[in-house]
Amino acid sequence: MYTVLIVDDEMLVRVGLKSMLDWEKEGFRIIGEADNGEKALAIIRQRKPDIVITDYRMPVMDGILLLMQCKKEQLPSKFIILSAYSDFEYVRSTLKNGATDYLLKLELEPEKARALLRSPCPLSDV
Protein backbone atom coordinates (compact mmCIF):
# COMPACT_ATOMS: atom_id res chain seq x y z
CA MET A 1 0.00 0.00 0.00
CA TYR A 2 1.37 3.41 -0.99
CA THR A 3 1.42 6.25 1.52
CA VAL A 4 0.15 9.79 0.90
CA LEU A 5 0.65 13.11 2.68
CA ILE A 6 -1.82 15.94 1.99
CA VAL A 7 -0.54 19.51 2.34
CA ASP A 8 -2.74 22.56 1.90
CA ASP A 9 -3.31 25.69 3.96
CA GLU A 10 -7.06 25.43 3.38
CA MET A 11 -8.69 22.97 5.75
CA LEU A 12 -11.66 22.44 3.40
CA VAL A 13 -9.33 21.36 0.60
CA ARG A 14 -7.63 18.84 2.89
CA VAL A 15 -10.99 17.49 4.05
CA GLY A 16 -12.22 17.34 0.45
CA LEU A 17 -9.18 15.41 -0.71
CA LYS A 18 -9.42 12.93 2.15
CA SER A 19 -13.09 12.27 1.48
CA MET A 20 -12.83 12.25 -2.33
CA LEU A 21 -11.79 8.61 -2.63
CA ASP A 22 -11.87 5.39 -0.70
CA TRP A 23 -8.10 5.65 -0.40
CA GLU A 24 -7.53 2.21 1.12
CA LYS A 25 -9.65 0.54 -1.56
CA GLU A 26 -7.49 2.28 -4.19
CA GLY A 27 -4.30 0.99 -2.54
CA PHE A 28 -3.27 4.15 -0.70
CA ARG A 29 -3.10 5.16 2.94
CA ILE A 30 -3.15 8.80 4.01
CA ILE A 31 -0.47 9.05 6.68
CA GLY A 32 -0.95 12.69 7.58
CA GLU A 33 -1.72 16.22 6.62
CA ALA A 34 -0.14 19.63 7.11
CA ASP A 35 -1.22 23.22 6.58
CA ASN A 36 2.16 24.52 5.38
CA GLY A 37 5.36 23.26 3.83
CA GLU A 38 7.45 23.54 6.97
CA LYS A 39 5.16 21.19 8.90
CA ALA A 40 4.99 18.91 5.87
CA LEU A 41 8.79 18.74 5.62
CA ALA A 42 9.01 17.48 9.20
CA ILE A 43 6.44 14.77 8.41
CA ILE A 44 8.18 13.83 5.16
CA ARG A 45 11.53 13.49 6.93
CA GLN A 46 9.99 11.24 9.56
CA ARG A 47 7.41 9.20 7.61
CA LYS A 48 8.81 9.29 4.03
CA PRO A 49 5.48 9.15 2.16
CA ASP A 50 5.42 7.77 -1.36
CA ILE A 51 3.31 10.69 -2.63
CA VAL A 52 2.91 14.27 -1.41
CA ILE A 53 -0.12 16.14 -2.70
CA THR A 54 0.62 19.77 -1.95
CA ASP A 55 -0.72 23.22 -2.63
CA TYR A 56 1.49 25.52 -4.68
CA ARG A 57 0.95 28.64 -2.56
CA MET A 58 0.96 28.42 1.24
CA PRO A 59 2.26 30.48 4.14
CA VAL A 60 5.58 29.71 5.86
CA MET A 61 6.89 27.45 3.05
CA ASP A 62 5.13 26.98 -0.29
CA GLY A 63 4.84 23.77 -2.27
CA ILE A 64 7.71 24.54 -4.64
CA LEU A 65 10.15 25.30 -1.81
CA LEU A 66 8.97 22.10 -0.11
CA LEU A 67 9.61 20.13 -3.30
CA MET A 68 13.03 21.72 -3.77
CA GLN A 69 14.06 21.02 -0.16
CA CYS A 70 12.99 17.40 -0.48
CA LYS A 71 15.05 17.06 -3.67
CA LYS A 72 18.02 18.68 -1.93
CA GLU A 73 17.73 16.20 0.96
CA GLN A 74 17.15 13.35 -1.49
CA LEU A 75 13.83 12.45 0.09
CA PRO A 76 12.11 9.97 -2.26
CA SER A 77 8.52 11.30 -2.29
CA LYS A 78 6.77 12.00 -5.58
CA PHE A 79 4.96 15.36 -5.70
CA ILE A 80 1.60 16.30 -7.15
CA ILE A 81 1.10 20.05 -7.02
CA LEU A 82 -2.36 21.56 -6.52
CA SER A 83 -3.20 25.13 -7.37
CA ALA A 84 -6.10 27.45 -7.97
CA TYR A 85 -4.01 29.11 -10.69
CA SER A 86 -3.92 27.94 -14.29
CA ASP A 87 -1.03 30.24 -15.29
CA PHE A 88 1.47 28.48 -17.56
CA GLU A 89 4.43 29.78 -15.53
CA TYR A 90 3.13 28.02 -12.42
CA VAL A 91 2.80 24.77 -14.33
CA ARG A 92 6.22 25.16 -15.92
CA SER A 93 7.84 25.98 -12.58
CA THR A 94 6.38 22.94 -10.81
CA LEU A 95 7.36 20.50 -13.53
CA LYS A 96 10.80 22.07 -13.94
CA ASN A 97 11.41 21.55 -10.23
CA GLY A 98 10.51 17.88 -10.36
CA ALA A 99 6.78 17.63 -9.68
CA THR A 100 5.16 14.53 -11.12
CA ASP A 101 1.99 16.40 -12.07
CA TYR A 102 0.09 19.64 -11.61
CA LEU A 103 -3.65 19.77 -10.99
CA LEU A 104 -6.09 22.64 -10.76
CA LYS A 105 -8.13 22.53 -7.56
CA LEU A 106 -11.31 23.54 -9.34
CA GLU A 107 -10.97 20.62 -11.78
CA LEU A 108 -10.09 17.98 -9.21
CA GLU A 109 -12.70 15.27 -9.00
CA PRO A 110 -12.61 11.62 -7.93
CA GLU A 111 -12.09 10.17 -11.41
CA LYS A 112 -9.18 12.52 -12.19
CA ALA A 113 -7.57 11.80 -8.84
CA ARG A 114 -7.99 8.05 -9.29
CA ALA A 115 -6.57 8.14 -12.81
CA LEU A 116 -3.57 10.19 -11.73
CA LEU A 117 -2.78 7.97 -8.77
CA ARG A 118 -3.14 4.80 -10.87
CA SER A 119 -0.99 6.09 -13.72
CA PRO A 120 2.56 4.76 -13.74
CA CYS A 121 4.14 8.21 -13.55
CA PRO A 122 3.51 9.20 -9.90
CA LEU A 123 4.79 5.92 -8.53
CA SER A 124 7.59 5.08 -10.91
CA ASP A 125 10.88 4.77 -9.04
CA VAL A 126 9.12 4.73 -5.63
Image (cartoon, grey):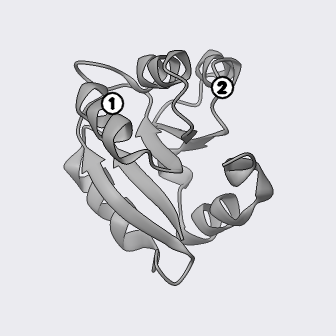
Q: Earlier in the sequence, mark 1 or mark 2?
A: 1
- Callout 1 amino acid: Leu
x and y, in percent, of residue 79 in the image? 56, 39
x and y, in percent, of residue 124 in the image? 75, 49
34 vs 82, left or right, is: left
Residue shown at 31% from the left, 28% from the top: 37
Q: Where residue 98 is drawn, which disc sits there?
A: 2
Quarter of the figure with residue 58: top left
43 vs 123, left or right, is: left
Residue shown at 35% from the left, 72% from the top: 19
x and y, in percent, of residue 107 in the image? 56, 53
The residue nearer to you, when weighing 23 against 31, is 31
Query: Which residue position is annotated with label 1?
Result: 41
Q: CA distance from mark 1 to mark 2?
A: 16 Å
| Vertical order, 59 against 52 (above or below) | above
Question: Dot 1: within a 10 Å radius of its alpha carbon, few (fewer than 14), some, or many (20 or more) residues?
Answer: many
The residue nearer to you, when weighing 91 against 73, is 73
| Vertical order, 86 against 126 (above or below) | above
Quarter of the figure with residue 27: bottom right
Disc 1 is placed on an element classified as helix
Residue shown at 25% from the left, 37% from the top: 9
| Vertical order, 44 against 14 (above or below) | above
Residue shown at 55% from the left, 25% from the top: 74
Quarter of the figure with residue 118: bottom right
Residue pushed farthest right? 120
- Callout 2 amino acid: Gly
Q: Quadrant of the N terminus?
A: bottom right
Residue pushed farthest bottom? 25
52 vs 94, left or right, is: left
Q: Where residue 15 is drawn, which disc sits there?
A: none
Mark whose residue sits in front, 1 or 2? 1
Disc 2 is placed on an element classified as loop
